[in-house]
Image: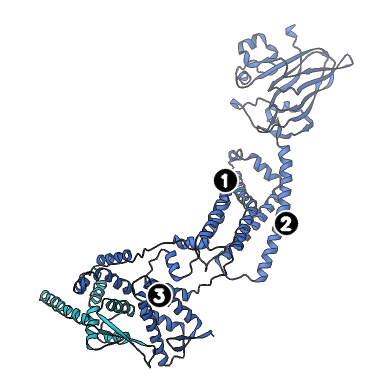
Chain colours: A blue, B cyan
Amino acid sequence: MKKNISINLFGTLYNIDEDAYNLMESYLQSMKRYFSRQEGGEEVADDIEHRVAELLWQRREAGMTAINIETVKEIIDTIGNAEQIASDSGEEQGTTAEGQDATFKESFSQFTKEAERFTRDTYDRGRNHVNTHHFYRRADDKILGGVCSGAAAYFNSGDSLVWRLSAVLGTLLLSWIGIGLFIPIVYIVLWLLAPVAVTPEDRLRMQGKEITPENLAQQVKEESQRPIVVQNNDGCAGGCLKVLLVFIGMIVLFPFIISAIALIFAIVMVAGVGTAMVGGLFGSMQFFPEFSAFVGTCQPLFLTALICGLIVVILPIYGIVRLLRGGKKMRASVLTTLIVVWLLAIGLGITCAVGTGIKAEEWDHSGRAKIEFKQSVKELKFVGWELKEHKNLEEEFTNRRTGFGGLPRYAILMEPDNYSDITYTAKLEKEVDLPEEGAYQFMSLTEGFDAGLSYTFSYMDGGKEKEAVLRPSDSGIHLNSINWEDLTKNYTHFFPFLDREDESSWYHFSVDEEDWVYQCVDLPHVDAGKFKITINARDCSERIKIREIKVVKKEQEKQ
Amino acid sequence: MDINNAKSQMRKGMLEYSILLLLKQQAAYANDIILRLREADMIVMEGTLYPLLTRLKNDGLLAYEWQESTQGPPRKYYKLTTDGEEALTQLNVSWEEISRTINFLKQ
């Protein structure tokens, strides 16, 4: 059922469907506007209107009671399929000056397209009818001001949706580098300056199409097929408010979106690390040791937060895309379900993210420094140390062989994170069993100094408790200042640490980059018994490598 | 060469001449002209006709008068002026020339 209206055309009443009327009206209007640019054009438009009336009349005489849109389209085809209107008018330009005879012959000579193009150009210039390509806002396809759809039409490229998404993403990206207001400002300026495409001519101009009766008729007909629903145009104030709301919303959503990107990045990393592990490429683990260790400590929380984050981000994007597409409305039940899922995802996601954050914080602090104990089979004898007390330190056993030739150069390593300025504390104890009393030496071989570091040997001497203390920060013998020859001649007391026959064992302690320090204190008499050696690292910030700390019976040959 | 374009150019060139010929016999309004042209197998888009008639009128070759009609809206009856008849004579001569040329070339 269609609404039917009566119109009076030159004294005769016609019944016409509303859509047919709109089409006819807009066709006649655009013809009027088109011909009004020419001399005597009003008359031509009037003639056309008369002709329309006549054709309508004929159809009514033939028994048509109400005029429908098909009839109007037929009439437009009859009259308006008039590419020739333009080119005939074009001939007018060249001919009036030269007389009728010339007109006739000239017309005949214009066989070629070139000639036609020439007359057309002359016509265009002569009529001051420049084919302008204007930027218009589209009233029929808009979310805010129709600027994006206008841009899509102006550049004749892409869907409005693409432009809208680009504007939104562009704003987000630009706000990253601090000029997030750029696109909104351009948008608002265009909104204020660019006119709305109201008439079919505007809509032709908007796409840079030539305004010819043919194009107009085409446009008008097309628009009748795809009715132009002009959404109510809110005033500038209301519009600006909308823009503000949208962009504020974007700024609020920004952290969410960024965290989503970060999470996606994280997934890729986890996947990458996982693959590396599966592939046995332990080398690549070295790149993300902290990350993989971190994920290892709080995997379920982390993954839940990840999934929730994705839901929180993807659902609204899906919604926005649907909205911009202008598709069918979602069923209420589906919509409600999605909203509930989204809200749940926000709640759960935030909870898990906070949980992950707390875990990460803990991990962060505990992971700032680590202590390693050598455990290779060969060095097991060194490991009798027990970590009694520690702060900001994480225990780690390793059998990693370091140094040239695969010889480990330390038994204990205490190492803070390169980039942290925190201090760590550790107290380690080891029991030594001295089966016989006598003169002993308490000695240590250390690389790295820290004022907070000391070694203590607590022993009994004639039934009295005594303590011997070594501080690597105090004086000692720097091994890289002596050579093998010196060593074998003058520093034979090192040999509890070294292989007397093997010069290469020495090189590891005499390299320039490292500063191994030997310290030794003589203990003239120690009772037999079990005693304790203590390593005290208090508020240390340096990396410390301990090759060995031991109590050795003083060699008799020296005396 | 675009043959359709050439054909339409040829017809277009003949259109004014045809209209003058047609109106020499009797005054007519747009619908008559369209029907007569169609009868003569001269295919004309109606939209073409109105600017052409207006132009010929403005050039003083045609004149018109309104006549009320019982069959629809009032009609604009066009007829040849003396200038129009003069122009037609010239066009007749031209046509003869063209026709001769073409026939000559065809042999």
Q: Residues within 10 Å of mark 1 (few under 14, many from 20)?
A: few
> Circle 1 is placed at which residue position?
A177
Q: Chain of mark 3?
A: A
Q: Amino acid at mark 2?
A: Gly
Q: In the structure shown, which secondary structural element does the residue marked by tag 3 occupy? A: helix
Front residue (pair A413, A454): A454
Task: Kindly identify the residue that appears in the image at 77 percent across and 33 percent down.
Answer: A391
- In the image, taking residue A325 as reference, residue A59 lies left or right, namely left
Give me the chain letter of mark 1.
A
Quadrant of the rendered image containing residue A324? bottom right
Which residue lies at the image location 25% right of the left edge and 78% below the top edge? Answer: B60
Looking at the picture, which amino acid does disc 3 mark? Lys
Q: Is residue A286 left or right of residue A69?
A: right
Spatial distance from mark 1 to mark 2, Cα to Cα? 30 Å
SS of the residue under disc 2:
helix
Q: How many marks?
A: 3
As displayed, is residue B6 above or below residue A193? below
Q: Residue at x 78, y 32 (%)?
A: A390
Q: Does A442 sit left or right of A167 as displayed?
A: right
Residue A494: x and y in percent read 69, 15
Q: Residue furthest top?
A: A559
Which label was assigned to residue A32?
Answer: 3
Q: Earlier in the sequence, mark 3 or mark 1?
A: 3
Q: Earlier in the sequence, mark 2 or mark 3?
A: 3
Q: Which residue is mark 2?
A: A347
